[in-house]
Image (cartoon, rainbow, N blue to C red):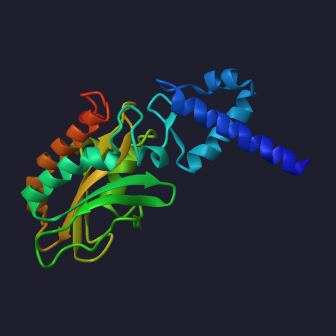
Amino acid sequence: MAAETGTQAIDRAADLLVSVVESPRPLGVSELAARSGLPKSTTSRLLGALERRGLVQRAGDRRVVPGPVLLRFAHRDTSESLVELAAPALRVLSDISGETINLGVPTPLGVEHLSQIDSRHFVGGTNWVGRRVPYETSANGKVLRAFSAQRPVEGQPVRAQGYATTVDELERGLSALAAPVFGPESVAVAALSISGPSIRLTRERIAELAPALIEQARLVSERLGAPSTTQRGAA
């Protein structure tokens, strides 16, 4: 019986995931429960398991949308992958800054880097593609947390300025700034970052680069179908 119950739970969770992915709009827990014929408590528990694995996430109004694990590969409304959509922004930021440019997405275990353009300097960042970094000590982690559906109180300063920074936090001598990339539900689904040695990427240089970073993140967000008003004023 235990094995059968486990199979039923997997089937029910899979059905909920399909409903979320195929829906043209975010769905509430009550609506998902009604569609599936499951009790609301069971629906909420299964959605919690899917959310912990990054398969679904909550939008700002707590309705359920596809999670970062799905969004990292492709957006539902376009045949282009997130990496392809962000590629022009990475190139622009590389030309402007000369530093290492990354595209990262949230996962349950940290921020995973999907794409990178290397610094044109001899002293620059390492190859981060495929690697994960902690949310607490990375610029892209801080900005993804600040602009997540939960909108934590400690993220208000990041939301007010539109980007996050780290100086000697992830690694001594390494500085970075990151801005959020939003999906249609106004939740951050990725982050664009510029990183380099702290001796080059000073606080003054970070302030100079921030407007271009925010603008390129906004353009990628628009390609993903985000509302034009999302990037600013989200505190």
Which residue lies at the image location 30% right of the left edge and 35% below the top edge?
234
State the residue lying farthest toward the front. 79
Where is 82 relative to 101, above or below?
above
Q: Position of residue 95 (x, y in %)?
A: 8, 57
Which residue lies at the image location 10% right of the left edge and 60% below the top edge?
97
Res. 122 image quadrant? bottom left
Q: Position of residue 54 (x, y in %)?
A: 52, 48
State the residue lying farthest toward the right. 1
Where is 141 relative to 68, above or below?
below
Image quarter hosting the C terminus = top left
Figure disc tally: 0
Q: Position of residue 223 (x, y in %)?
A: 26, 35
Res. 20 image quadrant? top right
Which residue lies at the image location 57% right of the left edge and 51% below the top edge?
53
In the displayed structure image, the side of residue 33 where residue 104 appears, left or right: left
Res. 159 image quadrant? top left
In the displayed structure image, the side of residue 15 where residue 196 appears, left or right: left
Front position in the image: 195 or 114: 114
Q: From this viewpoint, is residue 45 visible?
A: no
Front position in the image: 176 or 78: 78
Q: From this viewpoint, is residue 27 visible?
A: yes
Which residue lies at the image location 63% right of the left edge and 26% below the top edge?
32
Q: Position of residue 105 (x, y in %)?
A: 39, 52
